Amino acid sequence: MARMKFLCDAERCIECNACVTACKNEHEIPWGINRRRVVTINDGKPGERSISVACMHCSDAPCMAVCPVDCFYQTEEGVVLHSKDLCIGCGYCFYACPFGAPQYPQVGNFGSRGKMDKCTFCAGGPEADKSDNEFKKYGRNRLAEGKLPLCAEMCSTKALLAGDGDVVSDIYRERVVSRGFGSGAWGWGRAYPGQGA
Amino acid sequence: MTFIHLASQGQPVSGRGVARVSTLVFAAVFLLVQMVGAALEAGARAVEADKIAATQSGQTGSPDVTPNGQEPVDHSLRGHGGPVHAIQLNKTKTRALTGSFDYSMMYWDISGDQPKELGRLDEHEHWVKAVEFLPGDKRALAAGGAEVWLWDLETGKSLHVFKGHTAEISALALSSDGKLVASASSDRTVRLWNLTTLKPGPVLKGHRGPINGVTFSKDNSLIYTASYDGTVRTWASDTGEFKRILYRHGFGINTMRRIPGGDQLVFGTLNGKALVIDGKTGERVHQFKDIEGPFLATAIQEKPGLLALSGFQKKGGDVVGIIRVIRIGDWAPIEEYEDPRGPIWAMDFGSIGSTIYYGGKDDYVTVWQVTPRKPFEAISGPIPRRYEVSKTAGPGELQFARKCSLCHTLTSGGGNRAGPTLYKVFGRKVGTLPGYPYSDALKNADIVWSEKTIELLFGLGPDHYLPGTKMPLQKIADPKKREALIAFLKIATEGESGSGASRGKSVNETEKQGSKEQ
């Protein structure tokens, strides 16, 4: 079974925001919610980099660890999903996610948050695959349709990669080899001082 | 211990005369007796920071039983119907306030051997995520959702509700003179409220994310705020004017407090960092050892000068809560404790820093004795909670445990959680259970609970069927699951036997629900 992964190549992202728009359109995400966003560092300065960020579907997802009602689950493909029937909108996952993935529409009547919403890797939720209920609550289930996340499919420079982690890493490895040393993952040098750019 | 250490370093004996030696010996003995006497007088309450240091690594830890072999006294605070998110003890460590997901703030007497519940203040319309004693301990504040409630603790009556925020409040801070309170909210603002005139003060706007920490400067002239946007900012407390960004961390800041006696700030972040910075210059004073998960709460004991940081991290595939106790000043680690029950969201120091009261995912507050360390080892394994049900539970019971049990009990004596007990709910008119603070929407509703009305509640969703209810958006789209839930409720709400069966099964230790069966 494939282990699904996102990877954003900061050498290629041109901050066009097509991934953000594609995501909103595909899942009919309401106003005020962005499951995906583009973050730019050093904007307008030398060394500017942009990366597209959403839920990274962590192997050891901290959101799953903190949820007080245990509403998260991980699919066999490693996609982290949650049940909006169980979510109480407490915001605990927001305190734990380093990517800022959890979003809360301000429509709830429990606390002042609605149910949490986040990127599903276009894999829907606990409702029946491709059902109306699933679409209304979680958006399109493209994985069930045999497709990959639309954000990556739409990326014009193929900066955003999504799919089987082995395939994604092979593609990225080829790019790094082709571009030369130092062109690896953005932030590598900061995370691992002395081991590259 | 301190006094022994000092006595052992007595003046060197010169050898010039016996009388002089005798005098010195006498003086040393006298000094020793004096010090021992002083130490005994101070008794159990005098737990100095360096005594705590001596117990680090658990060398002086005692087994979790009393000397005469009896079961230890349970000091935990039990009474809430939902996870505890806020804890504050008063300065004399004789009273405690706790806030929970059950929409209530509880008031406790913790001066005796057993904690005693003094009051349950449950009129809030949302969960309580911050609590604060006012000077004198006769009044208190609770952040219930987007509102700040002022309570009289002696009468149990609410004195005022400060309204203005548009999203829930995550932190409160009181000025040292007790005249102003600042509330930090997910609506990205901090609001000031005057506790004398009960009038709203300035609104601090500028953060680009929810604000998780707020505190006044030592002289009350400034307010420090810490946000999910990764910045610590300063503001004028009289006008609310933005002064400057004091520190940029990048990752979100989850908790922040001022160190008493000065303007140093300690904060814990989303990416497992904890730092002390200078509140005047913004310079980094100290950085603590990282954890692999986020820091979630901080607590400070002014005397003898201790700081506690809590959060969680993964350990061997499990999620363990973590508490670190650190000495203020040299920032030396004193103790570290792990709780396998998960993240620690709230805590405060007990008597003179020797204990810590903390809350996590459970409905109660646990007391950990920092020194002598007790329990010595981390308490035993994860406890399945009421919503962590097995696949072997019946379909209706499964629906109840996963979707209802966080907020409702089934027994007459089970008490109320965020919602009322469902004991004998069939045939009950909506909004009529004595003792539960219903919303106006339910008080005025003309509905009697039956199979049909419960079917409609979950078919249409509470927000459509009973607009204005406190109940969360909760639809059960599958008619078969609704039917199973109602069939279960018909039996389980009728008596203790039905509910007992439900509880017993729902806490077995088999695998949790996953994927499409929730």
Image (spheres, helix red, strand yellow):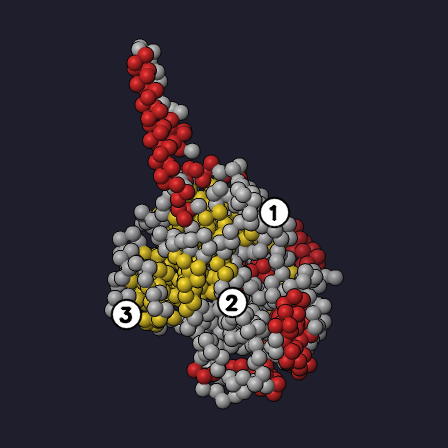
Residue B250 visible to an observer of this rendering: no
At mark 3, the secondary structure is loop
- In the image, residue A193 above or below residue A169: above
Q: Residue at x 37, y 36 (%)?
A: B39
* Residue pointed to by mark 3: B198
- Mark closer to the observer (2, 3): 2
Q: Residues within 10 Å of mark 1 (few under 14, many from 20)?
A: few
- Mark closer to the observer (1, 2): 2
Residue situated in front as seen by the camera: A170 or B489: B489
Q: Residue at x 42, y 33 (%)?
A: B1
Q: CA distance from mark 1 to mark 3?
A: 63 Å
- In the image, residue B73 above or below residue B304: below
> Reading the chain from its start, which is encountered first: label 2 or label 3?
2
> Residue B81 has which mark?
2
At mark 2, the secondary structure is loop
Residue situated in front as seen by the camera: B292 or A20: B292
